[in-house]
Amino acid sequence: MRLFSSDLFRNFSIGFVLGALLVAGANARDGDSGLSSPARAASMPDLVQPTAEFAIPAEAAL
């Protein structure tokens, strides 16, 4: 028995084709009904100001 016989390749190709058909059938059954509207990013505030709790004092920066 050879390691890479034609039967091995034939069985893998048949399995690949059947698996691809199963996946395609499962996806086709759902259709577009499960898709929601596209995501929209939240609007940015006009000007973002840092808060005092995150400010680094000038003495600590050196």
Image (tube, helix red, strand yellow):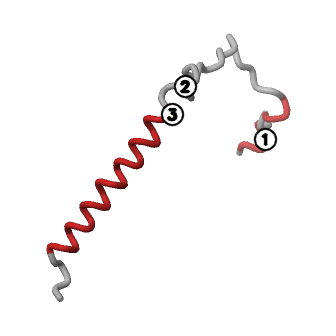
Q: Position of residue 62 (x, y in %)?
A: 71, 45
Mark 2, residue position: 33
Q: Secondary structure under badge 2?
A: loop
Q: Nearer the viewer, residue 49 or 38?
A: 38
How far is the residue under mark 2 from the one under mark 1?
60 Å
Q: Are marks 3 and 2 in contact (CB under 8 Å)?
A: yes
Q: Position of residue 22 (x, y in %)?
A: 40, 49
Q: Is residue 47 left or right of residue 37?
A: right
Query: Of marks 2 and 1, which one's residue comes earlier in the chain?
Result: 2
How far is the residue under mark 1 from the one under mark 3?
62 Å
Q: Is residue 31 left or right of residue 46?
A: left
Point out which mark residue 18 bears. Answer: none
Amino acid beneath label 3: Asp
Q: Secondary structure under badge 3?
A: helix
Q: Position of residue 11 (x, y in %)?
A: 25, 68
Amino acid beneath label 2: Ser
Residue depth check, mark 2 versus mark 1: number of the one nearer the observer: 2
Q: Nearer the viewer, residue 47 or 18?
A: 18
Q: Secondary structure under badge 1?
A: helix
Above-or-below relation of 38 to 26: above
Residue 16 position by quadrant: bottom left
Mark 1, residue position: 59
Above-or-below relation of 44 to 29: above
Mark 3, residue position: 30
Please name the residue shown 85% across and 34% down the image. Answer: 53
How far is the residue under mark 3 from the one under mark 2?
7 Å
Amino acid beneath label 1: Glu
Q: Are marks 1 and 3 in contact (CB under 8 Å)?
A: no
Residue 24 position by quadrant: top left
